[in-house]
């Protein structure tokens, strides 16, 4: 396939000839090969190519949930045209409460895998790709659900996407815990794969109740922590672990407490480097933390502190067992922060300035700041 610029004079990034189109299968293969150096993690190139096709078939992505896009010229032929830039979009369910405290379910599009062909960089094609998305995504609907915004996670700092209209949020911080061996708790148990559908269903109900109970005066958006998001991360985890170790983790999280005051976490193992040669950044991510009772009595709060400590200690032990250096918990709420402090668990807060910077573009009228709009539960599960 000839995707070089030799026979295709490159148009300016402002040219009206540039369009967003869906790539062919052959073009997708080229994109995957080009992006391997940046996103291959601990996999080999053949494994990464296999993973890319595999993840296109998991629940969050299939049936139109994920769409691939390329920026190219409208008169260039498929499988011969240069791919100037590319990305994926994921359709996500979102809860929204408006300033009058009216609840609704809508659609937010996640923008992922934004990639500019190295041969064509510094020509403005990445920005043109994002500008085209900004015009197109508000017009996309899924049945009766309205498209109200788009999110992305920048790995190139805050400035680039802010200039293009994606608001950076103050929620870009996380707690980090070192992995530790020998931690055992009688308060908590592991969450297994068969537990996930019920826990995610209950989480949706808890989240709706939480959103409905927040004070009016501000628009709030929450990506629904549904089973499809969790399964995407676990599918990626399972693929990598099977290739690296020949088997997959059985524990999908940890749970403590009695019904009505439970606390649970769901997690995923991520290998950025091979565990036997480059383990420094390998991480157990807490995808989702659920606190069933957000208004505990003083006595209940004491119990909750112990429950949270128990599930996080199981996470630390799981990380150690699988050769992961740390456990990361994104966007802990003020209640969670207080509980972690009182638990006595050693941890550190990390402010993300350059990588995984959560950003949101609102499709409503007028300029938007954090005084107007809040992203509730900006946790790792929504990173897809």
Image (spheres, grey):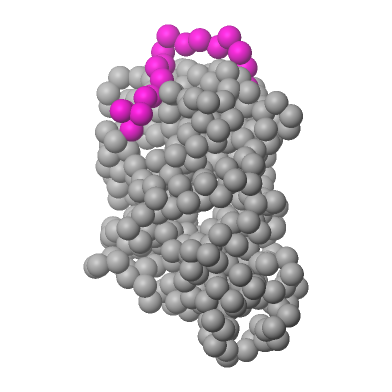
* Residue found at x 65% / y 52%: 36
6 relative position to 41: left or right: right
Q: Residue furthest bottom?
A: 16
Q: Residue furthest left?
A: 144
Looking at the picture, does residue 376 appear above or below residue 135? above
* Residue found at x 74% / y 69%: 119
Looking at the picture, does residue 267 appear above or below residue 355? above
Snapshot quadrant of residue 341: top right
358 relative position to 101: left or right: right
* Residue found at x 28% / y 27%: 260
Give percent across and percent down for residue 224: 36, 49
293 relative position to 55: left or right: left
Q: Residue furthest front?
A: 1
Looking at the picture, tell me which residue is in the foreground, 265 or 48.
48
In which quadrant of the rendered image does the N terminus lie? Answer: bottom right
> Is residue 192 one of those drawn in magenta?
yes
Snapshot quadrant of residue 298: top left
Give percent across and percent down for residue 318: 54, 21
Range drawn in magenta: 179-196
> Is residue 195 one of those drawn in magenta?
yes
Give percent across and percent down for residue 183: 55, 12
* Residue found at x 54% / y 88%: 75
Snapshot quadrant of residue 359: bottom right
Total labels: the figure holds 0
Is residue 53 in sight in this rendering? yes
Looking at the picture, tell me which residue is in the foreground, 36 or 13.
36
Looking at the picture, tell me which residue is in the foreground, 64 or 102.
64
Give percent across and percent down for residue 22: 47, 71
């Amino acid at each position: 396939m000839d995707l070089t610029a030799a026979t295709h004079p490159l148009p300016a990034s402002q040219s009206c000839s540039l369009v967003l189109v869906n790539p062919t299968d052959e073009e997708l293969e080229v994109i995957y090969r080009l992006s391997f150096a940046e996103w291959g993690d601990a996999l080999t190139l053949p494994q990464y190519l296999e993973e890319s096709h595999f993840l296109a078939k998991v629940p969050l992505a299939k049936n139109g949930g994920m769409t691939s896009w390329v920026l190219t010229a409208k008169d260039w032929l498929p499988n011969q045209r240069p791919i100037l830039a590319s990305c994926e979009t994921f359709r996500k369910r979102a809860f929204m409460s408006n300033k009058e405290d009216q609840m609704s379910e809508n659609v937010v599009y996640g923008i992922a895998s934004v990639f500019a062909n190295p041969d064509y960089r510094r020509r403005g094609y990445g920005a043109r790709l994002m500008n085209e998305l900004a015009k197109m995504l508000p017009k996309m609907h899924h049945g009766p659900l309205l498209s109200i915004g788009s999110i992305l996670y920048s790995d190139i700092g805050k400035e680039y996407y802010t200039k293009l209209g994606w608001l950076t949020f103050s929620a870009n911080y996380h707690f980090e815990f070192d992995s530790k061996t020998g931690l055992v708790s009688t308060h908590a148990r592991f969450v297994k794969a068969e537990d996930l559908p019920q826990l995610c269903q209950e989480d949706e109900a808890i989240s709706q109740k939480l959103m409905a109970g927040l004070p009016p005066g501000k628009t709030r958006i929450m990506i629904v922590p549904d089973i499809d998001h969790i399964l995407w991360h676990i599918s990626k985890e399972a693929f990598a672990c099977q290739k690296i170790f020949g088997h997959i983790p059985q524990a999908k999280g940890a749970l403590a407490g009695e019904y009505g005051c439970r606390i649970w976490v769901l997690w995923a193992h991520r290998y950025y480097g091979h565990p036997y040669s480059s383990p420094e950044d390998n991480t157990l991510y807490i995808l989702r933390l659920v606190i069933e009772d957000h208004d505990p009595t003083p006595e209940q709060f004491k119990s909750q502190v112990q429950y949270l400590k128990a599930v996080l200690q199981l996470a630390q032990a799981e990380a150690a067992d699988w050769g992961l250096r740390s456990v990361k918990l994104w966007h802990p709420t003020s209640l969670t922060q207080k509980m972690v402090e009182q638990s006595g668990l050693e941890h550190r807060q990390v402010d993300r300035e350059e990588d995984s910077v959560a950003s949101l573009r609102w499709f409503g009228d007028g300029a938007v700041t954090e005084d107007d709009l809040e992203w509730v539960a900006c946790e790792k599960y929504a990173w897809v």
